[in-house]
Amino acid sequence: MIVTGGASGIGIETTSALAAAGAAVIIAARRTQAAEQVAADLRIRSVNPSIQVRQLDLADVNSVSRFVDEWEGPIHALVNNAGIMALPDLRRSSQGWEMQFATNFLGHFALTLGLRRFLAMANGARVVSVSSSGSLFGPVFWDDPHFHFIPYDPLLAYAQSKTACTLLAVGIKDRWGDDGIASNALNPGAIATNLQRHTGGLRTPEHLRKTPEEGAATSVLLAASPLVEGTNGRYFENCVEAPVVSSRPQSRLEGAPSYALDSANAHRLWEMAVGLLGGAK
């Protein structure tokens, strides 16, 4: 199993739980030295020596290509967990893409697409995409996803990227069923991690917060549990399928926005992403 960003935040607990259940886990991380230290601790905690680290920078398509080119053998689960949130200023990848969209979605899209044949080898692989309640704040901005015209807003950019993560799950369900690959998305909940370093910390009331272990639980469920065998193209939170909502809740941010589970949107996004990656250098 592969966990992107598996050496920080809820990724640590996701890696730990999967390894404790007996999986060989690859932590795909941008900063490998720090990740190796985490992996060493997790090998002891999970009583599983089969935790490795490989370098991956999701904002760099060349790094993604290298990761894919060096891979061998079947993959039983790919947990697209890594992410960045609410960058205060507009930043772009080397391809000119808005950085949250590039990292949270496009990098994971390229990775998942590149690893498809290895997922198919597993005869029942799962792809898990970590989305967010932030998706309730905005859809994909089809005509200007990289904020060339729309005034940049950190939350809107984050919302778009996380909506795209959910649409990836729907796109895989619609396209890769014959490969035996199931794909679902999830909202892990409000967990205090370094993800909120640009927002001044977690703002969620304490009684609604989760521990990192609780935040990782839904990822682990979707990656490994027989309870969700055959479940495909859905959105989960709190370890159950979330309701689909047609407007943003005014109190607790729960539910999947309807535009993030729409097959037509998923198809449109897939074609957009293929076009962008086809022109990437």
Image (cartoon, rainbow, N blue to C red):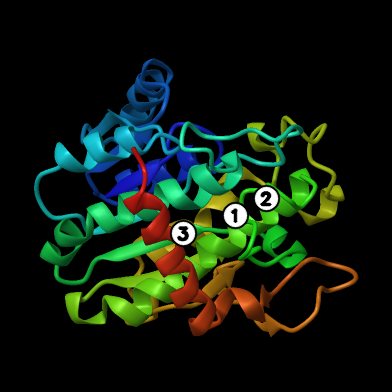
Q: Say which amino acid is labelled 2.
A: Tyr
Closest to the observer: 256 or 138?
138
Labels 3, 2: front one: 2
Q: Residue at x 72, y 41 (%)?
A: 86
- Image quarter of residue 43: top left
User: Residue 270: percent from the left, percent from the top?
Assistant: 42, 67
Residue with the mark numbered 2: 158
Disc 3 on helix, strand or loop?
strand
Q: Say which amino acid is labelled 1.
A: Ser
Disc 2 on helix, strand or loop?
helix
User: Residue 65: percent from the left, percent from the top?
Assistant: 25, 40
Looking at marks 3 and 2 on the same chain, the residue that comes earlier in the sequence is marked by 3
User: Residue 272: percent from the left, percent from the top?
Assistant: 46, 63
Mark 1 and mark 3: span between their CA atoms? 12 Å
Could one spot residue 160 in this view of the protein? yes
Query: 73 above or below 199?
Result: below
Q: Residue at x 25, y 31 (%)?
A: 52
Looking at marks 1 and 3 on the same chain, the residue that comes earlier in the sequence is marked by 3
Labels 1, 3: front one: 1
Q: Residues within 10 Å of mark 1 (few under 14, many from 20)?
A: many
- Residue 167 placement, left or right of 203: left
Residue with the mark numbered 1: 161
Image mark for residue 129: 3
